[in-house]
């Protein structure tokens, strides 16, 4: 009975996380590069990393709600679109019937410190027993960053660029940031290391193909 109750609670939590994504994307006009599709992709990667890591670190079973909610809602508190602290607080309030106050606080800490730019400036935060949960969510977001179409869409939406201009800008970002993530040792888990290698190779092949005219 307890397992069934726990599963139902987790399903309800995930449903409410995605409800928040849909609502916030509409309120703040969050474009497709950071909205529902991206949330689903990061959630999917977080689940895969979690499933691989729980074998070695079974204690993270008690942190599943933190991992899933942070993965789904991380970009609903992105400073590119809104006030980060205010939206983290609003997201925590939205989930207050499904998570404990301490879990909500940890989730907020993960969301507030996991971005590429934050890590490059400040390094990793010290979250103690939740450090692995933090890296699972952070790595899931980085794996989703290998999607160049997402990068193109962001530039087209935010800068009102033509497609050709957005493609050129996307490849600059890939060359400057995405293709350097493995050298910067940003992946810690075995799953993320293996998956990032596959995505890195695929991105490099695509990168060289696009040196020629894209049409």
Image (spheres, grey):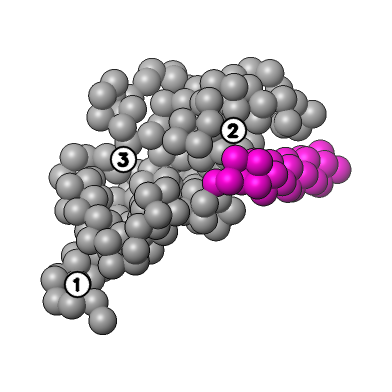
Q: Which residues are magenta?
A: 1-30
Tell me the number on the disc at residue 156. none
Crowd class of label 2 (few under 14; some 14 to 19; many from 20; radius 10 Å): many
Is the C-beta separation of discs 3 and 2 under 8 Å? no
User: Which residue is pictured at 50% across the width and 22% down the height?
Assistant: 109
Q: Tell me if residue 95 comes above or below residue 179 in the rendering.
A: above
Q: Depth-wise, is mark 1 or mark 3 nearer the camera?
A: 1
Crowd class of label 3 (few under 14; some 14 to 19; many from 20; radius 10 Å): few
* Residue ranking furthest to the right: 1
- Residue linked to disc 3: 188
Is 72 on the left-hand or right-hand side of 17? Answer: left
Quadrant placement of the C terminus: bottom left
Is 208 on the left-hand or right-hand side of 164? Answer: left
- Residue linked to disc 1: 210
User: Which residue is pictured at 69% across the width and 44% down the height?
Assistant: 23
- CA gap between label 1 and label 2 equals 39 Å
Is 192 on the left-hand or right-hand side of 204? Answer: right
Secondary structure character of the magenta stretch overall: helix
Q: Tell me if residue 213 comes above or below residue 24 in the rendering.
A: below
Is 160 on the left-hand or right-hand side of 83? Answer: left
Secondary-structure class at tag 2: helix
Residue 97 percent location from the top left of the image:
79, 29
- Residue linked to disc 2: 66
- The mark that comes first in sequence, 1 or 3, is 3
- CA gap between label 3 and label 2 equals 19 Å
Crowd class of label 1 (few under 14; some 14 to 19; many from 20; radius 10 Å): some
Residue 184 percent location from the top left of the image:
18, 40
């Amino acid at each position: 009975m307890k397992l069934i109750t726990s599963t139902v609670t987790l399903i309800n939590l995930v449903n409410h996380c995605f409800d928040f994504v849909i609502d916030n994307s509409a309120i703040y006009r969050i474009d497709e590069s950071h909205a529902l599709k991206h949330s689903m992709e990061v959630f999917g990667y977080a689940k895969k990393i979690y499933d691989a890591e729980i074998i070695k670190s079974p204690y993270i079973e008690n942190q599943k709600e933190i991992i899933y909610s942070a993965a789904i809602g991380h970009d609903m508190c992105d400073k590119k679109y809104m006030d980060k602290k205010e939206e983290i607080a609003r997201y925590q309030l939205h989930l207050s019937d499904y998570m404990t106050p301490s879990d909500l606080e940890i989730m907020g800490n993960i969301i507030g410190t996991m971005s590429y730019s934050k890590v490059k400036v400040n390094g990793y935060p010290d979250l103690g027993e939740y450090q692995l949960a933090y890296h699972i969510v952070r790595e899931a977001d980085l794996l989703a960053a290998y999607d160049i179409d997402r990068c193109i869409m962001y530039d087209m939406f935010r800068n009102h660029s033509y497609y050709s201009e957005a493609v050129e800008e996307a490849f600059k970002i890939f060359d400057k940031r995405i293709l350097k993530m493995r050298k910067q040792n940003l992946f810690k888990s075995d799953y993320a290391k293996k998956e990032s290698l596959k995505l890195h190779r695929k991105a490099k092949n695509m990168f060289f193909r696009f040196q020629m005219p894209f049409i």
